[in-house]
């Protein structure tokens, strides 16, 4: 292998200079710029570094070209961590499992597709590394030309030079890893949500009528109740009598406005107790809670209830959003 500049070596290997320079540095090759000459010893250092990095044997390669062995793609079932459902009388566990399967099905398919893309990129990267090492070992232009021609016949690599394929695959793999991580996280969320045994929701309606101490009325609350009704989730709004005075409504007027948005057989509650306390005392298996209150004054009651049963509720542009039930501004 004759001496050449680092820039010429990058051109010969088809590797971008900004990729080759860090590789030379990590391989222990000393240079000041891309115009510096790299001798045979420097090339051997780079070759040894690449072999170690890509888990290749350090023994000298055979003169004959060995066939590249590609692994067959494996289809792996993605495990779904399912939240253990509450054991309720009459619950059909088959229905629970079916609900989880239906909820996670589309995301499972998306994960399988992303994993297949990742595996294809890894195969492509391994093959490109193979050709890159062979180019580095070549001692004549004729040998390099033959390797390039052989590389061009690989359908998985296309017409790209090995170095460019390596750089592209590494960038793409980083993106795919991020997507896969996000998809797996979403899969866990969907599985946990689907495994919930939500039989009933208690809505702390008193604190949903105000925002930072100002009255916002009952329209956002009515919208939330309607979305819960569409999802088939019975919801009981609970008010304390003081709230009705503050929002200037009688109980009769309140019932008239909210009753159409409640599930059949469900009534709203106006209690002489604080709504906070009434809501917490209504805890039953299968009952969940929607509130924006932290229940500081009733911490003893709150501690008896699993944290997962409190569903976060936020006001966004005048509409209540409950991420745990996938209720957002766009509708139920």
Image (cartoon, rainbow, N blue to C red):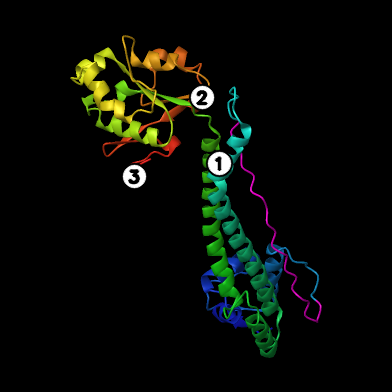
Looking at the image, the residue that sits furthest to the top is: 272
Magenta stretch, main secondary structure class: loop
Binning the other alpha carbons within 10 Å of mark 1 as few (below 14), some (14 to 19) or many (20 upward) gives some
Front-most of residues 109 and 235:
235
Q: Position of residue 103 (x, y in %)?
A: 53, 43
Which contiguous range is marked in magenta? 62-84
**Residue at the location (34% across, 34% down)?**
226
Could you tell which of marks 1 and 2 lies nearer the N-terminus? 1
On residue 188, the disc is 1
Question: How many numbered discs?
Answer: 3
Specify whether residue 202 is in view.
yes
Q: Secondary structure at mark 2?
A: loop
Which residue is under mark 3?
Answer: 330
Could you tell which of marks 3 and 1 lies nearer the N-terminus? 1
Front-most of residues 249 and 247:
249
Looking at the image, the residue that sits furthest to the left is: 248
Would you place residue 199 above or below residue 32 in this image? above
Which residue is under mark 2?
Answer: 286
Q: Position of residue 253 (x, y in %)?
A: 21, 21
Q: Please identify, in this view, whether the residue under mark 3 or under mark 1 is nearer the observer.
A: 3
Q: Secondary structure at mark 3?
A: loop
Find the distance from the CA under tag 3 to the CA under tag 1.
23 Å
Would you place residue 138 above or below residue 237 in this image? below
Quick check: 70 left or right of 218? Answer: right
Contact? badges 3 and 2 (CB < 8 Å): no
Find the distance from the CA under tag 1 to the CA under tag 2.
21 Å
Could you tell which of marks 3 and 2 lies nearer the N-terminus? 2
Front-most of residues 224 and 171:
224
Find the distance from the CA under tag 3 to the CA under tag 2.
27 Å
């Amino acid at each position: 292998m004759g001496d050449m500049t680092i820039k010429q070596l990058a051109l010969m290997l088809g590797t971008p200079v900004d990729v080759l320079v860090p590789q030379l540095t990590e391989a222990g090759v000393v240079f000041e710029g891309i115009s510096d000459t790299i001798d045979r010893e420097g090339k051997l250092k780079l070759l040894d570094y690449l072999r170690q990095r890509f888990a290749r044997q350090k023994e000298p390669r055979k003169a004959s070209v060995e066939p590249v062995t590609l692994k067959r793609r494996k289809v792996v079932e993605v495990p779904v961590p399912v939240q253990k459902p509450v054991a309720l009388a009459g619950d059909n566990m088959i229905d629970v499992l079916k609900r989880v399967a239906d909820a996670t099905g589309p995301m499972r398919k998306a994960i399988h597709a992303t994993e297949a893309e990742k595996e294809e990129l890894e195969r492509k990267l391994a093959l490109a590394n193979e050709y890159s090492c062979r180019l580095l070992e070549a001692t004549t232009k004729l040998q390099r030309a033959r390797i390039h021609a052989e590389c061009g016949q690989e359908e998985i690599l296309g017409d790209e030079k090995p170095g460019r394929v390596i750089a592209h695959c590494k960038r793409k793999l980083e993106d795919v890893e991020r997507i896969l991580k996000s998809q797996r996280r979403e899969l866990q969320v969907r599985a946990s949500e689907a495994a919930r045994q939500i039989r009933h929701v208690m809505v702390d309606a008193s604190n949903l009528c105000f925002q930072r101490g100002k009255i916002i009325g009952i329209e956002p609350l009515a919208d939330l109740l309607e979305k819960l009704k569409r999802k088939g989730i019975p919801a009981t709004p609970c008010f304390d009598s003081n709230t009705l005075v503050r929002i200037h409504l009688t109980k009769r007027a309140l019932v008239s406005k909210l009753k159409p948005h409640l599930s059949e057989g469900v009534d709203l509650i106006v209690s002489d107790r604080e709504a906070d306390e009434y809501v917490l005392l209504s805890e039953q298996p299968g009952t969940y809670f929607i509130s924006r209150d932290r229940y500081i004054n009733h911490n003893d009651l709150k501690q008896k209830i699993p944290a997962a049963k409190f569903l976060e509720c936020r006001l966004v542009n005048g509409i209540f959003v409950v991420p745990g039930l996938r209720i957002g501004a766009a509708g139920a």
